[in-house]
Every structure is written in structure tokens, then in C-alpha cells.
Image: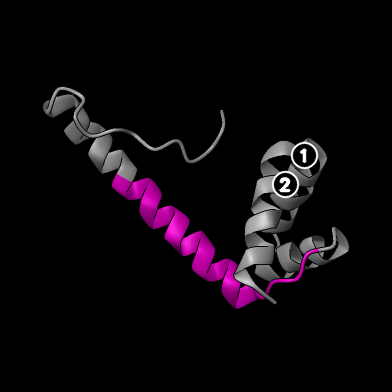
């Protein structure tokens, strides 16, 4: 179990549409299902590591949403961070 494995998994997830679809379905079932999909894909991370990472990502997303508003007010001085692909 490691955050580095989870990080590598997230990088692959951004590039692999099939894995992304599997994770989307697994997210409906909970973190244990996501960990199981990751394990089948060759990665080893715990539910706790996944939960911490998801919480950090959500906090960063909220902060980015806030700073994007501030960016408009400050004339673009606060850069927006891309967190997901559209």
C-alpha cells in the first residue's frame, strides 16, 4: 500500500478511458470497489489512502473554485489549477 502507487494509478486513470469507466462504476459502490479495481489493474493502495486523496482533491477543487472567482476580481493574478479533464 502506498500513496505513490495511488498517484501512478491516478495518472493512468487520466489516460485510460476504459479504466476511467470502471472507476466511475466502482465509485457508485464505494471506496472498497475502487480499491479492488485498482488492485486488478496492478496497483496497491488502501481505502484510507484513497479517502485521504479524494478529500484532498475535493478541498483543492473547492479552493480552486474560490480562487477562480478571486482571479476574476484581481484581473487574473490568481491562476486556476486544472484538476480534471473535460
Picture residue at 58% right of the left edge, 77% below the top: 48
The quadrant of the image that shows the N terminus is bottom right
Q: Quadrant of residue 68?
A: top left
How crowded pointer 1 is (Cα within 10 Å; few <14, some 14-19, many 20+) is rated as few
Q: Name the residue furthest top.
A: 75
Q: Which residue is mark 2?
A: 12
Q: Which residue is mark 1?
A: 16
Residue 30 at least partly seen: no
Q: Quadrant of residue 70?
A: top left
Is residue 58 highlighted in magenta?
Answer: yes
- Left or right: residue 81 versus residue 48 is left
Q: How is the image coloured?
A: one colour
Picture residue at 25% right of the left edge, 42% below the top: 66
Residue 52 in the image, given as x and y percentages of width and height? 50, 69
Residue 75 in the image, given as x and y percentages of width and height? 15, 22
Picture residue at 43% right of the left edge, 61% below the top: 56
Is residue 34 highlighted in magenta?
Answer: no
Residue 70 - label: none
Residue 46 in the image, given as x and y percentages of width and height? 67, 75
Q: What segment is highlighted magenta in the picture?
A: 43-63
What is the secondary structure assignment of the residue under circle 2? helix
Main secondary structure of the magenta stretch: helix
- Left or right: residue 42 versus residue 68 is right
From the viewer's perspective, is residue 38 above or below residue 17?
below
Q: Nearer the viewer, residue 52 or 33?
A: 52
Amino acid at each position: 500500500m502506498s500513496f505513490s502507487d495511488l498517484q501512478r494509478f491516478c495518472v493512468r486513470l487520466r489516460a485510460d478511458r476504459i479504466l476511467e469507466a470502471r472507476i466511475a462504476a466502482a465509485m457508485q459502490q464505494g471506496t472498497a470497489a475502487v480499491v479492488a479495481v485498482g488492485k486488478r489493474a496492478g496497483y496497491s493502495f488502501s481505502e484510507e489512502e484513497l479517502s485521504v486523496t479524494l478529500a484532498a482533491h475535493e478541498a483543492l477543487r473547492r479552493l480552486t473554485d474560490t480562487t477562480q472567482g478571486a482571479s476574476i476580481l484581481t484581473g487574473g493574478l490568481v491562476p486556476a489549477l486544472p484538476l480534471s479533464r473535460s
